[in-house]
Amino acid sequence: MPGAKVVVAGFDGGEEAARARIHDVASVSVVEPDKSIGRMIRGHPELFKKWIFSPDFLSLIRSDVRSFYRSNPRGNDAVIYPISGNMASATAGISAAAENYELTVEGISEALGALNPGGLVAIAGWNQAPPTGRLKILNLLMEIPGLFRGDGVTDHVCLVTSWSTHVFLVKNNQFTREELSRLSEFCDSRGFSLNDGGELSALDFSHGMNESDLWAGRLDLRPPRDNRPYPWHTFKTSSFRYLIGGAREEVFPRIEWGFFFLIMTLILSGAFAVVLIVISRPRNGNPSTSFPFFVYFSCLGVGYMVFEVLLIKKSGIVLAPPAVAAAYVLAPFLLFSGLGSHMAGRITWHPTIIRAVFLLIIPCGVGASAMLVHLVSIPEPARLFLIPMLMAPAAFLMGMPFPLALKSFSHRRETLVPWAWAISGYMSVVGSSLAGVLAVTAGFVALILLGAACYLFAALLFGKVAKGG
């Protein structure tokens, strides 16, 4: 596209900017949220081709891609999503459990909306066997209104493949015959293959994958959405049973190791938590109160971590890289939870107020999660101020149930206090692993439901724990 204005989603070592320069585009905007990239380029110009980073050609914009679309709704001729990671990590599924809000139905829809008429989005990826990455992106594109007809045919999408990579080309209007002809000539001259979209459906890419692999439920090919932003996750938890059966040789090469280790962390943390909680249980406790006591503090540990993990993952849509998102959630969460615990431990609360605390935690946590997506449109300094404010009410209230329960029985049964700490601490570890697995497999709505259920159960059990302790 000579003379075009191109947006590259992520720095990616400058390779896409170099290709754009070679093909005579007018300018390139690299949208990269990590500010260290800019410092690296300025501090070590000898590592990069200076002509690529000349001010008249390339602008490095420090922003996340979704915010860039909102602030630049038009004026771009192409948006390029470079290949994520190297081929080895992609094949091993290292990033399968990592959130990516760019390659979701909502993210690609916004990218198409940020283009000039006739503009296109290019989504690159590594070829895999079986072609799960292509199937996942294809199913994503099929969910965007206007790109595909009901019979699975499209005039808006083409697929270019080489021996190791593939690129989906998605236009916000139809490819013309002239464009398809030029694209075909380009592919022929370089040894690429072109599927012009005449019958571009998921079935067309199932070759090389036997029927049991694709249709027996071993693969998760649901299109990624903002509620479940995992475009590289395709392995179903139900397929783990094949690892101990005769089909393990077929399944093991397809395991996404990032997700596999998440599952193993959940299993091991759960097993250790049960053993350690049983060992630490007071021997002179009342058996009739032990189970409600265990459930109450387990709910607090799991519920707290579920809402915390939910907000960390949801904040990735407005803050990147992930370490920054985690910091801007964890810091206010710990601070305001501590303030809530401090207040709960020093004031005598009426039972009605205590019940209100439990009930208010749920809407505050859900509200903070729902509001995060609306911060995409505002400038980053305002985001950095508003995110802690969104976390404050939920975190403040979530800090109260634990000290309220301790205060109710600690003066009568001091031996139960260490056990309460043990249950809550162990189950917090389980809750963080469980939240990660549920987010990948069931989406963020499942986290909301689990967190709400935990605090509702805790509210119901508070009176019994306080009296029975």
Image (spheres, grey):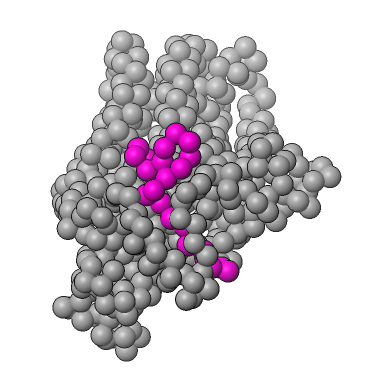
> Which sits in the foreground, 312 or 392?
312
Pick out the residue farthest to the right. Answer: 246
Residue 85, image x and y in percent? 48, 65
Where does the N terminus fall, quadrant-wise?
bottom left
Residue 53, image x and y in percent? 25, 79
User: Would residue 359 be found to the left or right of residue 296 on screen?
Assistant: left
User: Would residue 102 be found to the left or right of residue 393 on screen?
Assistant: right
Is residue 41 in sight in this rendering?
no
Residue at point 65% right, 42% down? 214
Residue at point 25% right, 47% down? 113
Asked if residue 81 is positioned above or below residue 114 in the image, the reply reads below
Give, as a single range, the part of the protein colored magenta: 144-165
> Which sits in the foreground, 98 or 282?
98
Residue at point 26% right, 31% down? 393
Asked if residue 436 is positioned above or below residue 57 in the image, the reply reads above
Residue 433, image x and y in percent? 54, 42
User: Would residue 255 be found to the left or right of residue 162 on screen?
Assistant: right
Q: Is residue 149 magenta?
A: yes
Res 24 quadrant in image? bottom left
Is residue 194 in sight in this rendering?
yes
> Which sits in the foreground, 301 or 44?
44
User: What type of secondary structure mainly makes up the magenta span?
Assistant: loop
Residue at point 33% right, 30% down? 365
Res 289 quadrant in image? top right
> Which sits in the foreground, 326 or 162?
162
Pick out the residue farthest to the bottom. Answer: 46
- Give the total of numbered labels: 0
Residue 212, image x and y in percent? 72, 41
Q: Is residue 356 magenta?
A: no
